[in-house]
Image (spheres, rainbow, N blue to C red):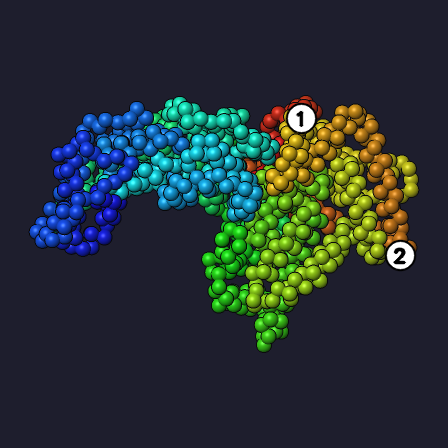
Amino acid sequence: MLKNKSGTDLRPFLFLGKGGLFRLVKLNYTSVMQEEQQPEAAADPMSSSDAPEDDQKETSDASPNISDADAFKILLDMKMKKRQKKPNLPSTVTELVTEEGSKVFVVGTAHFSDSSKRDVVKTIQEVQPDVVVVELCQYRVSMLKMDEKTLLKEAKEINLEKLQQAIKQNGVMSGLMQMLLLKVSAHITEQLGMAPGGEFREAFKEAGKVPFCKFHLGDRPIPVTFKRAIAALSFWQKVKLAWGLCFLSDPISKDDVEKCKQKDLLEQMMAEMIGEFPDLHRTIVSERDIYLTYMLKQAAKRIELPRASETEPRKCIPSVVVGVVGMGHVPGIEKNWNTDLNIQEIMRQADGRKVLRSSIREFLCSEAMFHLGIPTTRAGTCVTSDSKVVRDILYDGNPKNERCTIVLRIASTFIRFGSFEIFKPTDEHTGRKGPSVNRNDIRIQMLNYVISTFYPEIQQAYSDNSVQRNAAFFREVTKRTARMVAEWQCVGFCHGVLNTDNMSIVGLTIDYGPFGFMDRYDPEHICNGSDNGGRYAYNKQPEICRWNLGKLAEALVPELPLEISELILEEEYDAEFERHYLQKMRKKLGLIHLELEDDDKLVSELLETMHLTGGDFTNTFRLLSSFSGDLDPLKLEDFLEKIAMQCASMEELKVAFRPQMDPRQLSMMLMLAQSNPQLFALIGTKANITKELERIEQFSKLQQLTAADLLSRNKRHWKEWLQKYRVRLEKEIESISNADVWNAERVKVMNSNNPKYILRNYIAQNAIEAAENGDFTEVREVLKCLENPFEETEGLAEVQEDQEEEETVAAAAATCAPVASSRLPYSSKPPLWASELCVT
């Protein structure tokens, strides 16, 4: 930024011609000459002085007798004259040099320090930089414009209302992380009576006094840092960190701050608190070291000298840069300085580029869903390449290069519920709004297009009444969505991320990400490893889809009044879901002639029995077609043996119910619930704590249970339900003359509604691992199998594990040790190693 000695912005002078530029040079030249004549009388570096009135008068009266070229030359000469060849720099400054000869002076600061502010001012005055880079991003730039008093007040006033607002703006965990870091800053502020960031404000002021000096923001955007930091922590690590920050109370003195000239105070405190979380240190400190280094090197490119005219030849020289960063980042910047840096991975939140593993999963699953008869987008082809992107798969600091891959998606349309939220009005809490707010003309165009193109029968029936037409459209979308999610529930499919942007306007399953087919039946099954709160759990899917329809209804106002759409949603959604779900479940159980009121109870009791015994959802339904209802005790015992094999083994249950918190963590959470219930409620951990306590109780019971006891218990549960099922089947055949014909029809209906093959995670993983090694045979074999999910598929390479390998896998899974994936029949229950697969 161009400014004169008194802080006047110089950029307007570039448009004033010779006279304006001459006056600019006159003011700066006079100031420089005065400094040279009276070096001892230099002004306090924390303040600026104006040019003397006589000089101002002389300047205003002077005639513009120099050219623009001369004026530029004089300004540049003055800057170079003030730039010290051997600058007298504070001890906190580290000098770095680029390959092109540019110099970078990194000022290591403590964010709460008057001496750090003086160090910054002195460094900029000594070296007269071309660029000043500060450890701020666009989301924190406001602190440059706020005065110390306002910042001090803001830092101290952190209350529940601000916390709730942060959570609404950024989500629960990101909002908590932001506010808890502010709490640390506020704690230091309160202890010292000093607001943070003073060195950045001084850097901003001083940069404005240096001709041709640019001011750059050098830090990674804070939302990226928060999101990556949160992704690096487990749920309980997040809670533990929150606990530590909430109860921060250690006193801090100004002497402590000055001691931290060797290491920034705020970062030192954070380092102490996050010492147990190396992944958090990586995202908050190490990754930002890389980003800051990259931005400093970008700023230190050779610069082109200002030209007075286009005819003047271009001239480039090495640049001088001053970087203002926390002292804790200086060692990392030095370490990374001579390294080729790529910030693509540390900036990644979602770059839109798919890799081979996620593409294979989508390719296989979208085709599997189609052949299961569930409305879905299709996969036309899957094309991979030699291009690579860096992915940290488990967010554990071990990124690797993966092949970029493209899936050709096919659908009648990819318009989603979220497409209509571009009209969303300003949110009273966050201030956010849709990009097309108040553009009802576009909303009308979208509705006209969607209804006329994809619901032509509705357009034709209500062409003369737009409200009735829109109501009929919303009713049909509601019914299609209800039927779709009912189909999901009947095959144990979990989507994983059911936000409004993943809901198709024509009722298709869309956007296959962290999906999963349920193996062991658990109504609270969560397929998405990052869904800590279980928002998209299996049993929550009908509810969340209804919620999404409510958001679509809001987005259609005023073209469809909310009172009409809400009434439609109330009348249609639950009724359509329950009707379609029960209809499908009757077919899965072979109840093909009668529809009795108690059928829903029979289904509920079946699922409860599956839950109690850990029954495999897919294989249990498939096996029921072989249940004859015969009263012969031997046949019943034989069937009970078969169905017991589809129940969870002792090893599987121990893995499933293994406590996820150590006793200290659980105790800490229970204390937090008592000491700070408001924060506890915001974190949303009540259900998680309850589940953890249940897990501990179940695990304790398992420790006292033998394998024989478990088998006996499972058989007892199944015998009780099978007796009820037999009674219901007998009612089916009361009016049937030929029981054999009826049974053959029953088996046919059941086997055409209960798939033998689904895309289990372990099957997909085996195919992915082979493909990543260049062998796509397994992908093709799995696809062939999934194209005929209800039939016995012959000719596939279904290899059974030998006994020794089975024992190895079982032992490793019991201790959660990783083992190489092993081939099993595609219709098999998953091996124990599959329990460690995590999809996020």
Assess whether mark 1 and mark 2 are in contact (beta carbons under 8 angstroms): no
Circle 1: residue type: Pro
First in residue order: circle 2 vs circle 1? 1
Q: Is residue 532 visible?
A: no
Q: Position of residue 745 (x, y in %)?
A: 80, 53
User: Dot 2 lies on which element?
Assistant: loop
Tag on residue 722?
Answer: none
Circle 2: residue type: Ile
Instruction: List the residue tagged with mark 2.
Output: 736
In the rendered view of the protein, which quadrant contains the C terminus?
Answer: top right
Relative side of 696 to 43, left or right: right
Relative side of 536 to 73, left or right: right
Q: Position of residue 801 (x, y in %)?
A: 67, 29
- Residue at 20% x, 52% y is 13
- Residue at 41% x, 24% y is 255
- Residue at 43% x, 28% y is 265
Separation of residues labelled 2 and 1 (CA atoms): 60 Å
Nearest the camera: 395 or 726?
Answer: 395
Q: Is residue 66 above or below residue 664?
A: below
